[in-house]
Amino acid sequence: MNEQQDKIHPKAYIKGHDVTKRLKEVTNCHTILELSSLLNISSSTISTWHQRELTPYEVILRVHLHTGAALEYLLLGKGEPYPEKSSQYEQNMDIKNKKIANIEHFQLINGELFRCKRLIFDHDYLYKLEVTQPLSIEYRNTIYVIDRSVTQIVAGMYLIDMEDFYSLNTIQRLPGRRCSIDVLGSTLQIHEDDIKVIGKVILEINKK
């Protein structure tokens, strides 16, 4: 071995619920029962992954070989599931001499995000809104354009992850690293470490 060769260090592989969420996404399974049936394993096995924070390497490789989903996405939680089929924000198409941005789109249903066909937005308008990492979420007949680069809470509506449950909430930062969050019309106070901010809502589009 060449002594000057860079060492291969261990990676920070995702575990438990994070793995299951990605496996469900790339296999289009909505429930644990659907996923366990598809993979021909028991639901108790998946529960063990969650309880013990395990990384099921063989299952991940099997799903990768079957679906073509990127290992970096399934094992590390980085990038997109199908990068070769995806367009980056900067890689804009030109249709009828109009710049457009092809951005990721999800439906929010019962606390889960389901990937849908990507949406096309006017690139210049997103630039005017100063959205650098756009994401669109459809929830209750409204499409929310979210900037994933904004993960620090100040005030406004945010897409958050609370114990693997996604929601859109109006949040206000308070002293002492606490936040005031609106939940179904009721205001609660929580510590900022209790939630993970995915991004801030920049634009709302109501569907009639």
Image (cartoon, rainbow, N blue to C red):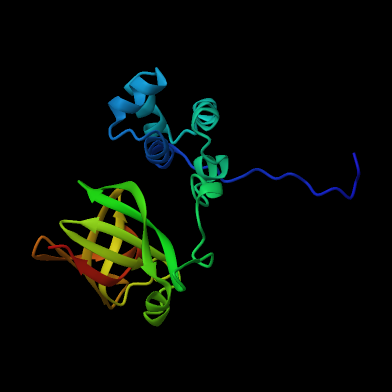
Left or right of 43? Residue 5 is: right
| Residue closest to the eye, 38 or 95 | 95
| Image quadrant assignment for residue 126 | bottom left
Q: Position of residue 192 (x, y in %)?
A: 32, 65
Name the outermost residue toward the right: 2
Q: Residue furthest left?
A: 185
- The residue sitting at 49% across, 32% down in the picture is 67
x and y, in percent, of residue 48 in the image? 38, 27
Identify which residue is drawn at 28% across, 35% down: 30
**Compared with residue 3, is residue 145 higher up or lower down, i.e. above or below?**
below
Query: How many marks are shown on the rendered structure?
Result: 0
Q: Quadrant for the N terminus, please.
A: top right
Asked whether the viewer can see residue 197, the reply is no
Q: At which x and y percent is residue 194?
A: 31, 58
Q: Is residue 125 left or right of residue 84?
A: left
- Seen from the viewer's position, the closer of residues 109 and 32 is 109
Which picture quadrant has residue 52?
Answer: top left
The quadrant the C terminus occupies is bottom left
Residue pushed farthest front? 96
Identify the residue at horizontal 51%, vertical 31% (top origin). Answer: 60
With respect to residue 206, does 25 lie above or below?
above
Q: Position of residue 140 (x, y in %)?
A: 15, 56
Residue 93 appears left or right of 159: right
Q: Nearer the viewer, residue 28 or 164?
A: 28
Q: Is residue 69 visible?
A: yes
